[in-house]
Image (spheres, grey):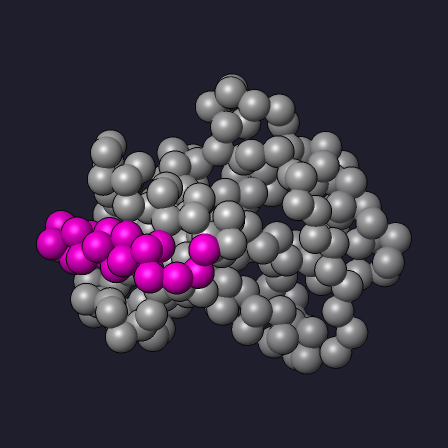
């Protein structure tokens, strides 16, 4: 199927923006969405978990047919892993603070479990920063695997790799619980929607 990608490496930091510590990313996101609109894209995927905090505002200036990665991911444990009632969340601080997965999972009576404080910063935030810097090696993998183990100790029965920097380095063999990959689920949803259009797009 034909694919149009707008990859902008200078979108302002979404977590910093949510905290009032950096510029608003919405104008840059909207400019990218308009470029896709000009290219006649029919279905749009926002391939960043944290950016979904800005999706409701993005729909207003650029009313395209967006797929919601958060909602789509939250619906999968019920189908693929019905034993999961507590889902561990490996994600940016911005995704956690926005409550995106907590609300979405809550619709299916699944509790979101997160790391807090120093553990989040030392393990997840550090690993994400390493991957953004081009390190796909042993160190970020070790940090994320440690984070997943800590979530499992907190009762997580599945782990969401809820940042696009996480799945490339987090080997499934190292996981103490089933790994749920929102990026992969979004890719599958795009294929399904492009192949079998439905009235259920968000």
Residue 155 part of the magenta segment: no
Residue 145 part of the magenta segment: yes
Determine the residue positioned at 78% across, 74% down. 2
Quadrant where the image shows the N terminus: bottom right
Find the residue positioned furthest to the top: 20
In this rendered view, identify the residue nearer to me: 57 or 153.
Answer: 153
Q: Say if residue 55 shows up in the picture.
A: yes
Quadrant where the image shows the C terminus: bottom right
In this rendered view, identify the residue nearer to me: 42 or 187.
Answer: 187
Left or right of 92 on screen, residue 120 = left
Determine the residue positioned at 41% across, 42% down. 92
Q: Say if residue 110 shows up in the picture.
A: no
Picture quadrant where residue 110 is located: bottom left
Find the residue positioned furthest to the right: 38
- Vertical side of 66 occupied by 59: above or below: above
Q: How many marks?
A: 0
Query: Residue 62: where, in percent of width, then height?
Result: 76, 43
Determine the residue positioned at 27% across, 58% down. 142
Query: Residue 61: where, in percent of width, then height?
Result: 76, 37
- Vertical side of 81 occupied by 116: above or below: above
Determine the residue positioned at 31% across, 72% down. 172
Left or right of 171 on screen, residue 72 = right
Query: Residue 11: where, in percent of width, then height?
Result: 65, 39
Picture quadrant where residue 180 is located: bottom left
Prevailing secondary structure of the magenta residues: helix
Provide the residue span drawn in magenta.
Answer: 135-154
């Amino acid at each position: 199927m034909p694919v149009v990608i707008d990859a902008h490496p200078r979108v302002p930091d979404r977590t910093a923006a949510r905290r009032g510590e950096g510029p608003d990313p919405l104008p840059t996101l909207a400019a990218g969405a308009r470029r896709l609109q000009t290219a006649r894209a029919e279905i749009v995927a926002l391939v960043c978990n944290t950016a979904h905090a800005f999706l409701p505002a993005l729909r207003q200036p650029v009313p395209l047919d967006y797929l919601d990665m958060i909602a789509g991911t939250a619906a999968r444990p019920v189908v693929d892993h019905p034993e999961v009632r507590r889902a561990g969340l490996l994600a940016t601080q911005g995704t956690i603070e926005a409550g995106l997965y907590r609300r979405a999972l809550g619709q299916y009576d699944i509790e979101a479990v997160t790391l807090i404080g120093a553990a989040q910063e030392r393990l997840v935030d550090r690993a994400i920063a390493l991957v953004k810097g081009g390190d796909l090696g042993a160190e970020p993998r070790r940090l994320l695997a440690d984070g997943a183990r800590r979530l499992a100790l907190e009762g997580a029965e599945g782990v969401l790799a809820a940042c696009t920097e996480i799945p490339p380095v987090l080997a499934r063999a190292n996981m103490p619980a089933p790994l749920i990959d929102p990026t992969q689920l979004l890719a599958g949803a795009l294929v399904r929607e492009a192949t079998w259009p439905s009235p259920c797009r968000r």
